[in-house]
Amino acid sequence: MRTHPRQCRNKLRHSRFPLSLLIAKYLGLVLTLLVNVTVMLAVFLVTLWMYKTPLHAALFQAVGLIFVELLLVTALALFFSTFSTTTLSATMTLGFYVIGHLMTDLKGLGENSRHAVVQVVVTWLYYLCPNLDVLNVNGQASANGIVDMSYVAVASMYGLLYAALLLTAACAVFRNRDF
């Protein structure tokens, strides 16, 4: 007995398998990023040890927030990949990454603009796009400055909640996608 292609699409759309496939794909990417960040940190620590440079806690805070940023950007890329082509998904992810690091400047530009339309559009972008600059404490880490742990905790929660929101949206889009 042959199964009609429409029946296969309906079964795939209404099963939980595509959602678990999406989450498994994200977890696989996260594991790959974790291994890469760990190896790079180990090489960096060996380099610091060879040059007898003292270690500071800010270094580990910065690496932790970089990893949270990678989790968020990966969730963003996965979200875009659920409804667009590979090239368009990569382009949109890169665009949101750049915008995310320029949020403070973008907000200031909107506030200083005399045009109401520019102010509205910039305000919408400010609240819609992830503010990746919150996760960037590299300046403090390079100056051996300790970042307050409450800031690290709040910034981490911001990044993780934003990533969870993007994954939830990706699952919703993927569930309603026509195969």
Image (cartoon, helix red, strand yellow):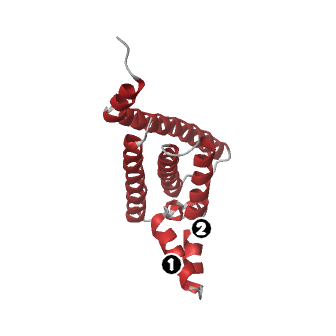
Q: Which is more N-terminal, label 2 or label 1?
A: 2
Q: Mark 1 highlights which residue?
A: 120
Is any atom of residue 54 visible in this view? no
Front-most of residues 57 and 93: 93
Of helix, strand and loop, which one carries label 2?
A: loop
The C terminus, quarter of image: top left
Front-most of residues 42 and 176: 176
Q: Residues within 10 Å of mark 1 (few under 14, many from 20)?
A: few
**Percent x, y of residue 7:** 35, 26
Q: Mark 2 highlights which residue?
A: 102
Is any atom of residue 89 visible in this view? yes
Question: On screen, 161 above or below 113?
Answer: above
Pick out the residue farthest to the right. 51
Q: Residue at x 58, y 53 (%)?
A: 92
Residue kind at label 1, given as amino acid type: Val
Question: On screen, 43 above or below 141?
Answer: above
Front-most of residues 175 and 65: 175
Pick out the residue farthest to the top. 1
